[in-house]
Image: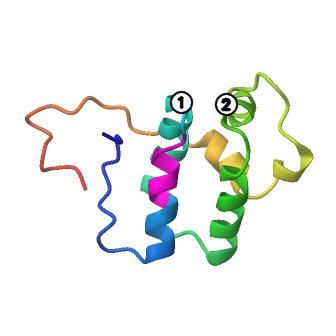
Amino acid sequence: MTGSTRSSADIEPRRKRILFRCWHRGIREMDLVLGAFADAEIATLSDAELDELEEIMAEDDADLVKWVTGERPVPERFLKGLFPRIRAFTPDFSPVTVETIGTQR
């Protein structure tokens, strides 16, 4: 189970691959951070932003968690661009209930 609420059926293969990789990081905290961000943003990211997201995803998960939580300073190369958007993203962690199934899109 990924936690994703977004279908990948309507997106191109590169975006589909990135979405999958965002939800399968190895550290659940990063699954939730990158996965939720990708669910919300993957369809509208430019090619340059997709390149940047792939660059971010190439970083070690333990480092990413520390940068996102503020435990360690974010490297200068990530101070601008997509990383601040990822760090500021607030996912919807509303519980899924029987009443909300089928109303989420």
Q: Residue at x 54, y 45 (%)?
A: 34
Q: Main secondary structure of the magenta part?
A: helix
**Is 104 one of the magenta-colored residues?**
no
**Do callouts 1 and 2 mark residues in contact (Cβ within 8 Å)?**
yes
Q: Is tag 1's residue or tag 2's residue first in the polypeptide sequence?
A: 1
Q: Is 74 on the left-hand or right-hand side of 17?
A: right
Q: Is residue 42 visible?
A: no
Q: Residue furthest front?
A: 26
> Residue 10 location, x and y as percent?
31, 74
- Amino acid bearing label 1: Glu
Q: Residue at x 62, y 68 (%)?
A: 50
Point out which mark residue 29 bears. Answer: 1
Mark 2 secondary-structure assignment: helix
Point out which mark residue 65 bears. Answer: 2
Q: Which residues are magenta?
A: 19-25
Q: Residue furthest right?
A: 76
